[in-house]
Image (tube, grey):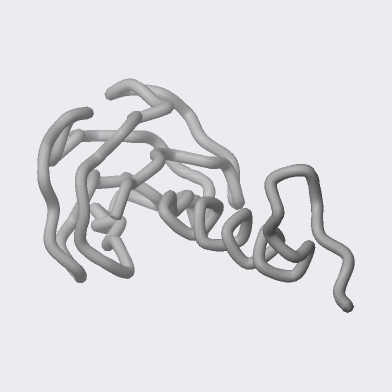
Amino acid sequence: MRRGTESGAPPERLLYLARELEMAEVEIRSELAGIVRKIEVPAGGVIKADEALLILECMKMEIPVLVPQGGKVKTVLVEEGAVIEEGQKLAILER
């Protein structure tokens, strides 16, 4: 007999549910350092896969930050004009 938890669910199932909840949000990070020139989709907005969330300026070039999947923009963590670093978290999407 498998041991469960107080809820009666086997531990493996709870781990799966925890992973599923984690995957319900997607962190969007910068692939390069630059300046946020324009936020294309604000918090609360809906965005499709491969659309630009915001525009970065790097070395006098404007570079769109594309999202890997569609969803609702839960939070935008930067402001226009902000200087950002490579790998910095820019926004969180909800599926």
Residue at coordinates 75% horizontally, 65% vertically from top-left? Answer: 10
Residue 22, image x, y percentages: 55, 53
Q: Is residue 49 above or below residue 29?
A: below
* Quadrant hosting residue 90: top left
Please give the name of the residue rendered at 62% of the width and 54% of the height, measured from the top-left corner: 18
Kindly indicate the quadrant of the structure image that contains residue 63. bottom left
Given residues 5 and 42, the one toward you in this image is 5
**Residue 28 visible in this rendered orientation of the protein:** no
Residue 65, percent from left and from top: 30, 56
Give above or below for 57 relative to 2. Answer: above
Quick check: 78 above or below 67?
above
Extreme-bottom residue of the structure: 1
All told, the count of numbered labels is 0
Left or right relative to 10: residue 93: left
Q: In the rendered image, which quarter is residue 57 located in? A: top left
Nearest the viewer among 95 and 51 is: 95
- How far across and down, in percent of the image, does residue 6 sit? 78, 43
Q: Is residue 68 left or right of residue 52?
A: right
Residue 42: x, y in percent?
17, 30
In the rendered image, the quadrant that contains the N terminus is bottom right
